[in-house]
Amino acid sequence: MMLLAGEDLAEALTRERSARLAAEAACRKKEEFIAAFSHELGTPLASAIVAATLIERLSPADPRAVTARHVLGRQLDQARRLVEDLLDLERVTTGTLELAAERVEVAQLARDSVAAIIVPTHEIRIEASPAWVVGDPHRLRQIIGNLITNAIKHTPAGGHLSLRVFHDDGAVVHRVDDTGRGMPADLVRRVLDALAQGEAPGGQPSRLGLGLSVVRILVELHGGRVEALSEGLGRGSSFIVRLPAAPTL
Amino acid sequence: MSKIAPTPWDEAAENPAPGEHVVQMYRDPELLIGVVARYCQQGLVKGEAVVIIATEDHRAAFARKLAALGADVPACTRRGQYVDLDAHQCLAEFMIDGAPDRERFVAAVTPHLDNARRAGYERIRLYGEMVEVLRPTAFAAAMRLEELWHELLEREAQPLLCAYQIDPLDRLEGRTLVPAIAQRHSHVVPADDAPRFARAVERAFLEVFGADADTTVLRQLCERYRPHTTTMPPTQAVLLNLDELNPYLGDAVRAAAAAYYRAGG
């Protein structure tokens, strides 16, 4: 066994202490993540349970049952997306996420992605000029889907959403704007991180930015970048994704 | 769908229409004193008679508060416009084997209404807390007494205000007592501070079900799930119906709402 001299011992103790603090911080972050994820998954499941009970107890033709069926579908889909996002984060962490590299026409892909999201509560306007990128069509659809569902989630019923796809300075830009709750400046800076949490107006519960983190990671894996904008609470939000345009053939 | 009162909730307790049977739920006894005193004052000002059946402490507190609001209570009492009776003594007149007897109840209460009419007051406001005296130890008897009051009000076409010191956001009281009490009244005022109560329940709903657009839709579905004949704030109707749909989630909303209410809504 090697004995450490005084200075070496002090250095070893300092290293040990900082390693311990880092491990404790990582552990706390993991606990926070699990708590936030459980809450985030629990809310669509709670809505789905109530919707399912309403469907069970009301006559199938009752308009309330019809509405409850739509709620059930959307909430289960939200829960599924959340689990999918979590798995994707895990795949990125373990280096097992594989991306296809195909030429993809993103204007049509954007229209298809929005059409797959049924939202009678919001109006979604799409303006998309033909544009090509090289990437994984499934993941590109996921990027748009996550941005749109995030906007729906944070925009009260009756609000407006828009998705624009256009060329700008050698990049293909996807811009999602909403008239929703918006974000304070400090949240705008953190919202694309997996544990970003913010409080909605009225002190509603904090939330996990899992879907937006997945967007950031996928965009970066495609060689692009994403930016969040908001002029503050109650003033809507914008998310701008810039992907390298595919070389012309 | 639950009937939604078009006026603020304190209005329901302070200015009921003839035949209405309003219940005020409260935590803070001071709140009750204020509500009942304003209820009485509004009646006195309008030239109505007021008949109070309350505990000794409350009778004294109501009279003090009424005086502070500008009412000449001794003069009103002398001319038969203000009658205050002891709840325990009244109960003793009609309770048999732990349950209220219909005939004796009618015989105990109607003479006071007849006296007020003889004194020239056709409109009579009633306030009763015999039910709250019974509630902690004899809840079934209290509910039976509510039914007897209901029958009396239908015949007499006079309004009655009742009060219970219970918390609709408490798990046990909210899930068991509130539905039974609500069913036996025409109007429910569920808390000391109705707007704070509504805010607390709405925030709790968002906490449990998420803050997306579907939550608004779901809250409306819960509110309209089971029509109530009692008029109550939409948030109280949501709590009652959610308990029927899923008591576990009803408890979760109630617990979160209680925390928000304590924090100011």
Image: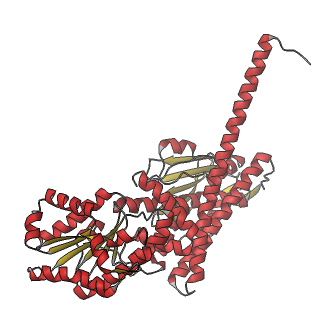
The structure residue drawn at horizontal position 53% and vertical position 77%, both measured from the top left corner, is A67
Q: Nearer the viewer, residue A14 or A118?
A: A14
Q: Position of residue A10 (x, y in %)?
A: 75, 16
**As drawn, is B159 to the left or to the right of A233?**
left
Quadrant of the drawing holding the C terminus of chain B: bottom left
Res A158 visible: yes
Q: Residue at x 10, y 68 (%)?
A: B76
Q: Is residue A190 above or below residue B241?
A: above
Residue A234 screen position, x and y as percent:
42, 53
| Along the line of sight, the residue nearer the viewer: A216 or B241 | B241
* Viewer-closest of B179 and B65: B65
Q: Position of residue B164 (x, y in %)?
A: 36, 67
Residue that appears at 71% across and 49% down: A222
Q: Is residue A121 left or right of residue B157?
A: right
Q: Residue furthest right?
A: A1
**Residue A113 in view in this figure:** no
Above/below status of B103 relative to A217 = below
Give the mark count.
Answer: 0
Q: Nearer the viewer, residue B189 or A230?
A: B189
Colour scheme of the picture: secondary structure
Q: Quadrant of residue B83?
A: bottom left
- Furthest residue in direction top, as rendered: A6
B4 displayed left or right of B77: right
Q: Position of residue B25 (x, y in %)?
A: 36, 66
Pick the quarter of the image with the N terminus of chain B: bottom left
